Image (cartoon, helix red, strand yellow):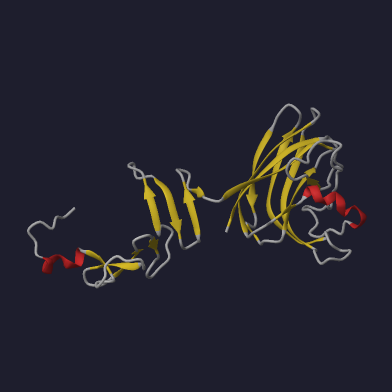
Amino acid sequence: MGSLAGKSPSSTYKSLLKVANETDGVTTVTSQIEDGEGTSTCVNISDDSFGVQPQNDNTTTTFRVRDTSNNTILSVDTTNSCVKVNATQTYANTQLLEFTAYRLVPVAGRHYFVPCGGNSFAGHVAEKDNGTGTDPDTTLDAGTTTDELVNMLFYVPANITIDGVRFIVSTDTDTDTTINVHLYSFSMVNAGGTSDGNLSNGTLLANGQATSVDRNVIKTVSAGIDSADVTSGQVLACFVENETNTDDINIRVQVMYHFR
């Protein structure tokens, strides 16, 4: 780095930093940091606050903190409006959501709701399916069994982005089976009428397949993300399908997401 030793201000003023308020200096009101010829930086300060705001362009590294080995441990991305932390540079507001089922009894080829959270033990939640196509149905009018959906759904409280979906699965016999998993978002009616709880506008968020599943193994699969963003007020639902037979399914699905 250069030194100002022995140099006059007239030859070095461009490299000097100052506050924009040249009369009062640092006060209770924030003032932009400028160089000696008045070019504004992204930094502004007062006696009690410190701010960073890009002057021309948003970037993925508007603010960054690194350790002595040059590893980024905190970064503020104004291009994507997010903050990432730690060596993994994970979104600072990352959340985990689980869907779990214990001894879910399927019919081959049907997509069954996987209960959300801890509502997963046999006898506590009835099996409920949503279609027999390649993917689950995109609508559901549950009629008089809408109450059975309550423990299957996650209400999205704010706009989120799905960052990853992983599931582990096993069955209860020695017969190899193929297990398919789908994560969906739905619009859910909430109009104060008799159709409240009906699902529509189903969107595939992620899907994955585990093959050669039996009781002797636990298969671990990272599902592919098909559509990451989910709007607040929608609901998430997870589905599992035993493509092969009626062997009971034990499954845990972990959804990693962040608020946006």
* Left or right, 127 with reference to 68: right
Quarter of the figure with the C terminus: bottom right
Q: State whether residue 227 is above or below residue 210.
A: below
> Residue 28 at what x, y percent from top left?
35, 66
Q: Residue at x 9, y 65 (%)?
A: 8
Query: Outermost residue, right direction?
Result: 144
Q: Residue at x 83, y 59 (%)?
A: 197
Q: Residue at x 37, y 60 (%)?
A: 48
Q: Nearer the viewer, residue 219 or 193?
A: 193
Label count reads 0
Query: Outermost residue, left direction?
Result: 6
Q: Residue at x 19, y 67 (%)?
A: 14
Q: State whether residue 43 is above or below residue 164.
A: below
> Residue 34 at what x, y percent from top left?
27, 68
> Residue 165 at what x, y percent from top left?
64, 46
Q: Nearer the viewer, residue 46 or 104?
A: 46
